Image: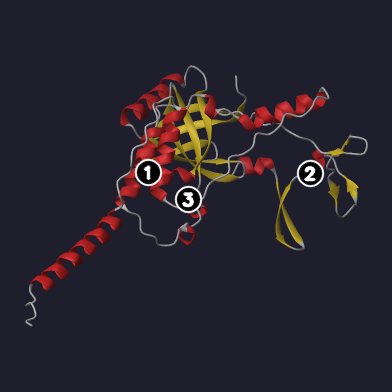
Amino acid sequence: MPRTIWSGAISFGLVTVPIHVQSATEDHSVRFHQYHLADMGRVRVRKICELEDREVQQSEIGKGYEYSKTQVIPISDAELANLPLPTAKAIEIDAFVPLETIDPIRLSEGYYLSPDGQVAAKPYKLLRQALARSAKVAVAKWAWHGRERLGILRVRDDVLVLHLMRWPDEIRDSAELAPPAVDIDDTEIEGALALMDTMSRDDLEGEEFRDTYTEALEQIIEAKREEKPLPEAPEPEKPGKVLDLMSALNASVEKAKASRGEHAEVHEMPKQKTTAKKTAKKTAGKKTTAKKTAGRKPKTA
């Protein structure tokens, strides 16, 4: 059972749903500590008071806001827990919107919400089923970790999931990162769509979606522990120069088919329209020249 990291209630109009918040994800990354390489002694960070020049214990440490260089305002955890906000103790639902209207860049970590006891079971299930039937998500606000948060409530299987969401002013403008103006031909777009269709699938289950970095790191640690030779890294594929975009797309489609066990047949991509236009112009030019030649009178001797 995941550990409860926040308790409160969902406020849905006049309906209140007492809930517990638990993390919906796990981090399986390999963790490292810092060591003194000469004797492998653990290196630790000590907390020193600048005024007294001594190490202080955790029980002596609190939060403070630097109002000026000479004045610091202490703020206790109890004061943060009792902020004069309606969202201090509850997740206030403000609106319901289609999920596709929310830019995924604004979404962050996800948390499971569980009903707090038998009394909360019925309103919890009511909200879950109503959300599922509406095909919408609930936009909500609540106070957590020293600030007011924005998030969405959605349905996953039989439970409600709360996703943290960034405020609009926290998203940087991407305009300055846009690529320079270039012309893209329709046949090139069709080639890219063909590649996407070849790589499309119905789920994200499979060997290619496992954490190979952590596995490789664990192999290194185990080899060093047993004093065995380290596993050799595979030679990375050298990316070739893309001189012809259509040829590269065609080769990518065939490579994707081959990796899925499909019969790899090389199909010639359609010629780009720009080439066709140039050929048409040349042909038109020849016809005009022929007409002019036909209209001339032969010279008499």
> Which picture quadrant has residue 97?
top left
Distance, label 3 to label 1, CA atoms, is 14 Å
For the point 50% across and 31% down, which residue is it?
A: 9
Asked whether residue 20 appears in the rendered view, the answer is no
Give neighbour class at mark 3: few <14, some 14-19, many 20+ (Cα, 10 Å). Answer: few
Look at discs 3 and 1 and give the one toward the viewer.
3
For the point 50% across and 24% down, which residue is it?
A: 206
Look at discs 2 and 3 and give the one toward the viewer.
3
Which residue position is annotated with label 1? Answer: 192
Q: Position of residue 18 (x, y in %)?
A: 50, 27
Amino acid type of disc 3?
Val
Asked whether residue 54 appears in the rendered view, the answer is yes
Q: Quadrant of the C terminus?
A: bottom left
Outermost residue on the front side: it is 301
Against 69, is 244 above or below?
A: above
Against 226, is 283 above or below?
A: below
Q: Nearer the viewer, residue 30 or 77?
A: 30
Q: Position of residue 78 (x, y in %)?
A: 67, 40
Which residue position is annotated with label 2? Answer: 61
For the point 12% across and 72% down, which residue is it?
A: 293
For the point 76% across and 28% down, which residue is it?
A: 221
Q: Position of residue 2 (x, y in %)?
A: 60, 23
Amino acid type of disc 1?
Ala
Distance, label 2 to label 3, CA atoms, is 58 Å
Amino acid type of disc 2?
Ile
Give neighbour class at mark 1: few <14, some 14-19, many 20+ (Cα, 10 Å). Answer: some
290 sits left or right of 215 in the view: left
Outermost residue on the right side: it is 39
Q: Which mark is residue 242?
A: 3
Q: Secondary structure at mark 1?
A: helix
